[in-house]
Image: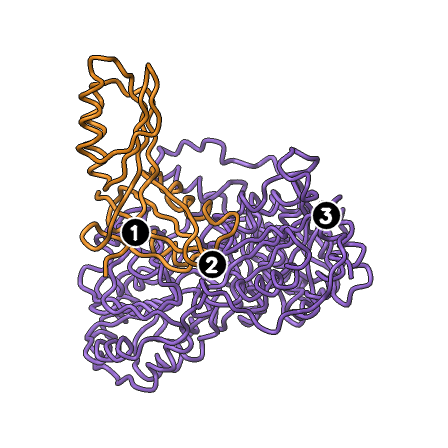
Amino acid sequence: MKGAKILIECLVKENVEVMFGYPGGVVIPIFHELFNAPLKFVLTRHEQGAAHMADGYARATGKPGVLLVTSGPGATNIITGLATAYMDSVPMVAITGQVSTEMIGNDAFQEADVTGITRPITKHNYLVQDIKDLPRIVKEAFYIATTGRPGPVLIDIPVNISNAEGDFVYPDSVDIRGYKPNYKGHPVQIEKACQLIEHAKKPVVYAGGGVILSNASDELREFVNKTGIPVTTTLLGLGAYPETDSLSLQMLGMHGTYYANKAVHDSDLLIAIGARFDDRVTGKISEFIPHAKVIHIDIDPASVSKNIIVDVPIVGDCKNVLAEINAKVKKPSIQPWIDHIESFKKSHPLQYSNSSDVIKPQFVIEKLYELTEGKAVITTEVGQNQMWAAQFYKYTEPRTFISSGGLGTMGYGLPAAIGAQFGMPEKRVIDIAGDGSIQMNIQELIVAVQYRLPVIIAILNNGFLGMVRQWQQHFYDKRYSHTCIKCAPDFVKLAEAYGAEGIRIDSPDKVEAAINKALSITDRPIILDFLVDPEENVYPFMPAGKTINETIMRELA
Amino acid sequence: MSQHVLSVKVENQSGVLARVVNLFSARGYNIDSLSVSKTEDDDISCITVVVNGDDRVIEQVKKQLNKLIDIIKVTDQPKEYSFQREIVMLKLQLSSSKRIEIFQIAQTFKASILDITQKSITLEYLGSPEQLDIFIEILRPYGIKELNRSGRISFPKD
């Protein structure tokens, strides 16, 4: 059997239902076999789109996202997508074509050292040098991508390997002596954690994307039920715990709620679960948690005591460890602490000044939440749109908020929404976008049109690269250097040109009708072009490297 | 900042060394010494890395090394708990007036003479990195024309 056919057989064995990609010279043999393959191939319009679609698909479904692109420029175009997935621990298998083995290193046409380039931004990568290794490598790639702390794995396949004859024997199991993820937490550490929790007076749970990756939301909810400890989540942890619950403090960090940051700062015990103490969460690290002991549950030993010295590290899968803790833990006595937090919730709420003249971006998000009954899958671009989407839509279920957190990739939201819609055909998927970010991968709109995907693209159009403009306003003397993008396409005409629906909304009283119209359309993508207040800012705003006491709060009119 | 000697057991495959050194270069750390060779098992290579760095950063690098799929084991090898050896080869100018002195130094250190001509002498010396430093400093005044050190290897004491 030819290498290309072996590859397809391997993908079928891995139950790959859909893959994303773009053809090119050295992958023609693989595309030749794909023609009749029992899996769906989605032709994107740019390789970066394929990477983000595979990523969005993986985050929405929990299954690995798979993509296939050609060598050289095809492969270099997925770099941003790989780095995005790597930072956010998304299981992905990227297959790239490579020039023939005897030409590698000779500056052949469309050659790039892809395993070299991607080494720091993949969990692992392979250059296939012998057809005999191909089935084992594919098996290992899926195993590595989906186990332990998940991440993208790349397989670089030279064209002569795709054309070579080999036997297809798919291995039953994987045994890599250097890779044995630890799933079960150490019982002694779990006991120590339970002791700390039981005697804590001011505990807070800080839950991250790891809770969602390990499908531990139910266990987290049970933990909170049993202990009554309030929960804040990271950006990627949104949905791990219902934000509608009274014990939810919503998101923490730079644009988190004041009460979440205050609770963490004042706490005497911080229970970090599947989170990594990112600088956007901690602010100035030395003053992040002056009074707290720290329990840190994470599957990645390299995340433990990286930025913060941890008192009780528990290396293991969040789901398993939480289940163990739930079986033993006793409820601490913390009513005064809960009352203290409640008072902060009342005195420093998440708020904005609505207007009847101009559309406030936060109002759009609130309306989207209301009219979708909180049941949509939200993807975002990066910047103000992302932060408002995080703050004002209330997430209650895991895998409903999909955003590039670690890398902060503009242009992520639209392809991720398309990928998520392929994985979740029964859900409404909404990309909350800015007028800047949406132009970075707008070419993928045609994919949604082609497959009749009713993805809604809600552009919060303020004519600015808003987040940078906000920093310029606060820290750079309002010198709006190259952040005004008023010279923009007509997004409604653009939608029409692609065969999508386009609606422009220029006043607050038209917001609801437009969203309802969009929700009534089920056979094509819809662009909602909301002309919003150009200089609206995201608050609260704890500037980079600063402390909670330096948080900039919204001044209400 | 302190010196660390890391012994890294890895799968004997292409690309593994690049993964290991990437973790240092990405942090702007210069590797002081590096050696790679096979072990008792042909499928396993041992990479010995000597690097100066902040203790916490090195601890983090060790954890990240352990995360790499092709890395089997990482150990810190402090001098107190390991044998550390290195080889130096060096070529000296050989003037007739200094010939006897150089022979005596070589004999004192139990260095081997690899080659000798009318104009030059090539010595080989095996020892701990500190012994090598002393050996080289003593010979420097005689005019070192060329010098090459092997990079350190380290072996744990029982």
Quick one: which chain is orange? B
Residue position for label 2: B69
Residue in the image at 39% along x and 58% along y? B66
Q: Secondary structure at mark 3?
A: helix
Q: Chain of mark 2?
A: B
**Residue A384: image x %, image y %?**
47, 50
Nearest to the eye among marks 1 and 2: give it. 2
Nearest to the eye among marks 3 and 1: give it. 3
Crowd tier of the residue under label 1, counting other residues whose Cα lies within 10 Å: few below 14, some 14–19, many 20 or above = many
Query: Is A263 rendered above or below residue B68?
Result: below
Q: Secondary structure at mark 1?
A: loop
- Quadrant housing residue A222: bottom left
Q: Chain of mark 3?
A: A
Residue position for label 1: A283
Tell me which amino acid carries mark 2: Ile
Query: Is A252 rendered above or below residue A493?
Result: below
**Residue A366: image x %, image y %?**
50, 63
- Which sits in the foreground, B73 or A371? B73
Q: Is residue A69 visible?
A: yes
Q: Chain of mark 1?
A: A
Residue position for label 3: A159
Residue in the image at 50% along x and 68% along y? A147
Q: Have a look at marks 3 and 2 and say if they share a chain.
A: no
- The colour of chain A is purple
